[in-house]
Structures are given as structure tokens and as C-alpha cells.
Image: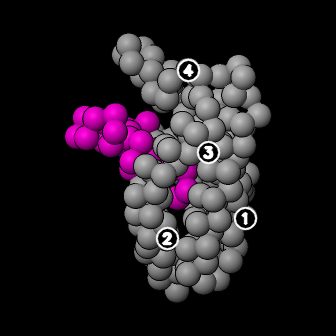
């Protein structure tokens, strides 16, 4: 969506890359900060329930498309882990990190597939987010099933966490599309 809006404005290629890189960096920063805020306000159970890192990644997919959002999906948990490790409390935990990288990459890729449709009609953000959530959670669960003999996770444990996180997924399934629709309206308004 962002790419199309920039193209409509005849923004030069180099400037497009700079703007998309800045937006990506901002979303990654948000993916690091939001979980910290949620954990301060609600503790670790709040993170499992609200899934705050997912919101910027889903937003990135809808706005940036799959290629750029993939960097947001992969780097968000990596940067968060690196920064929070320096503070003595890594988030996500090292054992969970590879699974979250895969899950958030899928979130970004799937929601990013809808970016052109979202530019045409903002309501496409709803199926984009819901499809990404389902695909990402299935990938996480599938990877745990595949590697449960070498990880501290079991399918039952992750299934329980998925059920606990349904609140966060439901909130994001509404909030992210509404944010995307609002941003789309601003981009189209500025275009006219």
C-alpha cells in the first residue's frame, strides 16, 4: 500500500527506499517497545494474552508488502532479544526465538500479500490480518510439533498459549485493519 501511494506521488526510487526503510525501522522499534510496556503494565501473562509484538508486524505487512514486511517480521524478535538480553531479561526467550522468527515472518508475508488490494479497498486489511494470524499460529504450532523432541515446548503447551492469546488476536484483528484504513485514508487524501 505504501509503495503504491509513493508511486502515485511520483516519488523517486531512492527516496522510496529511504521512506520504506524508515517505516520498517519504526515498526521494529515499536515491536520492541510495545511488549515492554505490556509487561510493565500486565506482567508476563499480559504478553501471552495481548501478543504486543504481533501488532507492528501485521501493520508492516499491510502497509509495506511482503518483501519489506519480512524484514520487520524477522528482525522484530531478533532486535528485541538482543536489546532485552543486554538488560538481563531476554524477550522472547532464546528457546522461543526461532519459532517466533518463523511465525512473525509468516505474519508479514501473508498480510503483505494483500497490500495492493488494501490500497484499492481498505476493508481488505481484515482478511489480510486474519489470514496472517491463522497461518502464523499454525506455523508456530507445526514447528513445535516437528521439533518437540529437542525443545522445551509441547504441542499441548503451545495450543494452550494460542488459546490464551485469542484475546490479543481478536483485538488485533480489529485494531490493525482500522489503523490501516485510517492510514490509507490519509495517503489517498494527501494524493488528491
Check disc 3 and report the residue beneath it: 104
Residue in front for this viewpoint, 157 or 90: 157
Check disc 4 and report the residue beneath it: 94
Say if mark 4 contacts mark 1, CB within 8 Å.
no
Query: For mark 1, does the 10 Å Cα neighbourhood hold few (<14), some (14 to 19), or many (20 or more) residues?
Result: some
Check disc 1 and report the residue beneath it: 113
Q: Give the x, y percent position of residue 20.
A: 60, 52
Q: Residue at x 71, y 19 (%)?
A: 150
Q: Which residues are magenta?
A: 32-59
Q: Indicate the quadrant containing the N terminus: top left, top right, bottom left or bottom right.
A: bottom right
Q: Earlier in the sequence, mark 4 or mark 3?
A: 4
Q: Residue at x 50, y 24 (%)?
A: 93
Please state if 37 lies on the left or on the right of 30 as rendered. left
Closer to the eye: label 1 or 3:
3
Query: For mark 4, does the 10 Å Cα neighbourhood hold few (<14), some (14 to 19), or many (20 or more) residues?
Result: few
Please state if 181 lies on the left or on the right of 63 as rendered. left
Label the magenta part by its dominant secondary structure: helix
Which type of secondary structure does the marked residue at label 4 adopt?
loop
Closer to the eye: label 2 or 4:
4
Q: Residue at x 52, y 86 (%)?
A: 192
Is-magenta flag for residue 147? no
Query: For mark 3, does the 10 Å Cα neighbourhood hold few (<14), some (14 to 19), or many (20 or more) residues?
Result: many
Q: Residue at x 44, y 64 (%)?
A: 170
Q: Earlier in the sequence, mark 2 or mark 4?
A: 4
Residue in front for this viewpoint, 166 or 29: 166
Say if mark 2 contacts mark 1, CB within 8 Å.
no
Is-magenta flag for residue 36? yes
Say if mark 1 contacts mark 3, CB within 8 Å.
no
Separation (CA) of disc 1 from disc 3: 14 Å
Task: Determine the residue located farthest toward the left in the rendered image.
Answer: 41
Check disc 2 and report the residue beneath it: 177
Amino acid at each position: 500500500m505504501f509503495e503504491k501511494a509513493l508511486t502515485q506521488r511520483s516519488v523517486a526510487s531512492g527516496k522510496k527506499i529511504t521512506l520504506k526503510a524508515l517505516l520498517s525501522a519504526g515498526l521494529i522499534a515499536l515491536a520492541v517497545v510495545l511488549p515492554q510496556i505490556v509487561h510493565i503494565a500486565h506482567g508476563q501473562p499480559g504478553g501471552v494474552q495481548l501478543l504486543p509484538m504481533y501488532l507492528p508486524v501485521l501493520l508492516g505487512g499491510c502497509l509495506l508488502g511482503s518483501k519489506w514486511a519480512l524484514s520487520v517480521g524477522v528482525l522484530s524478535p531478533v532486535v528485541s532479544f538482543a536489546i532485552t538480553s543486554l538488560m538481563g531479561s531476554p524477550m522472547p526467550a532464546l528457546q522461543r526465538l526461532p519459532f517466533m522468527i518463523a511465525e512473525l515472518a509468516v505474519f508479514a508475508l501473508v498480510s503483505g500479500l494483500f497490500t495492493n488490494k488494501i490500497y484499492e479497498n481498505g476493508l481488505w486489511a481484515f482478511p489480510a490480518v486474519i489470514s496472517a494470524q491463522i497461518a502464523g499460529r499454525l506455523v508456530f504450532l507445526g514447528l513445535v510439533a516437528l521439533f518437540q523432541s529437542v525443545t522445551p515446548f509441547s504441542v499441548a503447551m503451545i495450543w494452550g498459549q494460542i488459546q490464551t492469546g485469542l484475546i490479543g488476536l481478536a483485538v488485533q484483528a480489529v485494531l490493525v485493519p482500522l489503523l490501516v484504513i485510517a492510514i490509507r485514508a490519509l495517503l489517498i487524501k494527501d494524493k488528491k
